[in-house]
Amino acid sequence: MKETTDRIRSVYLKNERPIWIREPIAPMLAQSLTIFLDGELYRERVGASGVIDALQGKVADSWFVFVSMESVEAR
């Protein structure tokens, strides 16, 4: 699964944070979007990327977006 890193800026929250986007197998056909808040937690501790890879072809094709928390204090 192709993964890209980008940054998202919030004018309302006055911050900027990284996001990781995992593209579905067939991007033009995918009709689902799954968003993980606290992206680092799901990527590093939970191992969500490995789970997503293991389920590939067994569940509906989806875009997966991991949104970083700005900081523990901001949570």
Image (tube, grey):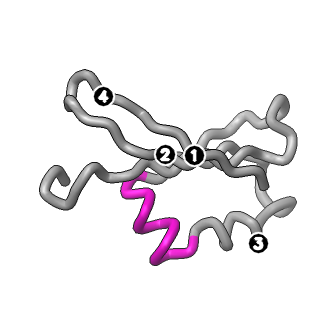
* Pointer 3 residue: 54
Q: Within 10 Å of the Cα at label 1, are there few (<14), some (14-19), or many (20+) other Cα atoms?
A: few
The answer to whether mark 2 and mark 3 are in CB contact below 8 A is: no
Magenta stretch containing residue 43, yes or no? yes
The answer to whether mark 4 and mark 1 are in CB contact below 8 A is: no
Residue 35 on image: x %, y %: 51, 46
* Magenta highlight: main SS: helix
> Where 66 falls versus 51 (above or below)?
above
Residue 68 on image: x %, y %: 39, 51
* Pointer 1 residue: 5
> Where 28 falls versus 41 (above or below)?
above
Q: CA distance from mark 4 to mark 1?
A: 17 Å
**Res 14 quadrant in image:** top left
- Mark toward the start of the polypeptide (3 vs 1): 1
At horizontal 75% and vertical 66% (from top left) the residue drawn is 53
What residue type is disc 2 on?
Answer: Ile
Q: CA distance from mark 4 to mark 3?
A: 33 Å
What residue type is disc 3 on?
Answer: Ala
Q: Within 10 Å of the Cα at label 2, are there few (<14), some (14-19), or many (20+) other Cα atoms?
A: many
Q: CA distance from mark 3 to mark 1?
A: 21 Å
What residue type is disc 1 on?
Answer: Thr
- Mark toward the start of the polypeptide (4 vs 1): 1
* Pointer 2 residue: 19
At horizontal 56% and vertical 74% (from top left) the residue drawn is 47
The magenta segment: 37-47
- Which dot marks residue 65? none
> Where 8 falls versus 57 (above or below)?
above
* Pointer 4 residue: 10
The kind of secondary structure element at disc 1 is strand
Q: CA distance from mark 1 to mark 2?
A: 6 Å
At horizontal 67% and vertical 72% (from top left) the residue drawn is 50
The kind of secondary structure element at disc 2 is strand
